[in-house]
Amino acid sequence: MNIPAFDGFNEVNVLKTPHHPDFRLDWQEELVKVALATSAAPTFFSTYRNGTRHYADGGVWANNPVMVALVDAMSCFDIDRHKIEILSLGCGDQDLRMTDGQIKRGGMFNWRTIIESAMHLQSQNALGQAGLLIGRDRMLRLTSAPTLEPIGLDDFVRANRELPAQAKRLVEENAERLEAFFDAKRFQATFYHGKRK
């Protein structure tokens, strides 16, 4: 598993399970601390302090972590890139367009929402790169259609009303490809550090 975050030194972090002999640092970390580190969305929450380090949401630089996972798979395992298949789950896309102010004037005020555009564009780029490396036909991206009215992180009522039906529709529309992902036999992961039973 690869969990993106970044720390107070503005350094990219990928917290990893010990699925490769070189990954010696993160396996002792409690899962709840990893979750707090990667979900500390800086436009909503403060950073997460873990010892002397402060972490913020990895979505800032890897909003769609598909390339983080693909690079890890290709560098850790002796596997042909054309034999890799990816199931990528999205959280919905906002339909972003430049405003008149952004086009004609620029400046901090007009570009105050640039983080949303940056994360959206990073996701598009990651999907494009992954598709070029393994073949677009070997990747399945499931996410809801772009909207001009995204569901807020704190809007449980709307999320509860809309998301289950969207998820059901996506599963039904992609049932055959999803079956291929979940019915295929997977090799058992080997962990090189930590307790072994």
Image (cartoon, rainbow, N blue to C red):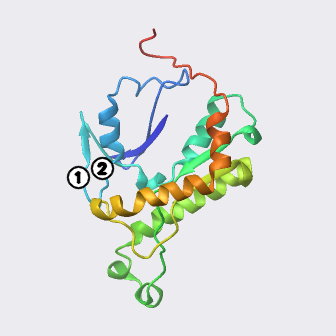
Give coordinates of residue 155: x percent, y percent. Answer: 28, 63
Q: How many circles with numbers are drawn on the protein?
A: 2
Give coordinates of residue 49: x percent, y percent. Answer: 24, 40
Where residue 46 is drawn, which disc sits there?
1
**What amino acid type is highlighted by mark number 2?**
Ala
Give coordinates of residue 161: x percent, y percent. Answer: 35, 62
Q: What element does badge 1 sit on? A: loop
Residue, x 71% and y 54% (percent of image)? Answer: 136
**What amino acid type is highlighted by mark number 1?**
Ser
Residue situated in front as seen by the camera: 191 or 15: 191
Q: CA distance from mark 1 to mark 2?
A: 6 Å
Residue, x 73% and y 40% (percent of image)? Answer: 81
| In the image, residue 26 above or below residue 165 | above
Give coordinates of residue 102: x percent, y percent. Answer: 43, 84
- Mark nearer the N terminus (1 vs 2): 2
- Residues at marks 1 and 2 touching, judged by CB atoms closer than 8 Å: yes
Where residue 11 is drawn, which disc sits there?
none
